[in-house]
Image: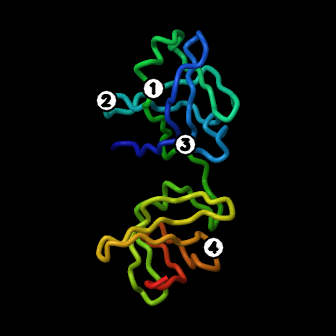
Amino acid sequence: MSEEFIPVGKISGIFGVKGWMKVFSFTEPRRNILAYSPLYISRKGEWVEAKISGGRAQGKGIVIGLVDITDPDQVLPLIGSELAITKKQLKPTAKDEFYWSELIGLEVINLRNEVLGQVKEILATGAHDVLLVQDKEHDVERLIPFVMGEIVEQVNLDDNVIRVNWELDY
């Protein structure tokens, strides 16, 4: 059984002389990436386990040290590699709370049972998150605010469907 990996960041550079690395975190807030251990590094299409030896917020970014990496030269080939966690490492969510990774790929249907497309991406806009929904049949992308109870009526992870109060021509 293969594990399901969820990207949580990317190695963006070298930090200091002890083999620490700069990391661009995909988590919200950014420092949440430090709560996960182990992390997994993408190496030649495989996920390789990496234990964190330390980490902290540094300016607007995150820096992390890994066990067994003690020299900046060891970091160089890792720059650009994604960091991930396993799905099992995620904390359970409350009712009407979802991880973004769970929503990507779900089909979006309006209250008239018209298919609006599939969730391609989720954008953080400040006020609320926005679903970028791709409708390949009509070659259109829709931006739908992710506002539970107002626009998003239901998220059904078992059926892979998000039901929204949204029309085809919005």
Q: Residue at x 55, y 58 (%)?
A: 123
Pick the residue in front: 121 or 101: 121
What distance separates the C-alpha of mark 4 from that of mark 1?
A: 38 Å
Type of amino acid under label 3: Gln
Q: In front: mark 1 or mark 3?
A: 1
Pick the residue in front: 12 or 101: 12
Are discs 1 and 3 less than 8 Å apart at CB?
no
Q: Which element carries disc 2, helix, strand or loop?
A: loop
Is the residue 106 above or below the residue 2 in the image? Answer: below
Mark 4: give few (<14), some (14-19) or many (20+) Cα within 10 Å: few
Q: In front: mark 4 or mark 1?
A: 1
What x and y, as percent, mark residue 71? Answer: 52, 9
Residue on which the image places disc 3: 89
Type of amino acid under label 4: Met
Q: What is the number of the mark on residue 79?
A: 1
Mark toward the start of the polypeptide (2 vs 1): 2
Q: In front: mark 3 or mark 2?
A: 2
What distance separates the C-alpha of mark 3 from that of mark 2?
A: 23 Å
Q: Residue at x 32, y 72 (%)?
A: 139
Quarter of the image holding residue 42? Answer: top left
Is the residue 52 above or below the residue 68 in the image? Answer: below
In the image: residue 165, left or right of residue 133: right
Mark toward the start of the polypeptide (2 vs 4): 2
Mark toward the start of the polypeptide (1 vs 3): 1
What distance separates the C-alpha of mark 2 from that of mark 4?
A: 39 Å
Quarter of the image holding residue 136? Answer: bottom left
Q: Residue at x 60, y 53 (%)?
A: 92
Residue on which the image places disc 4: 148
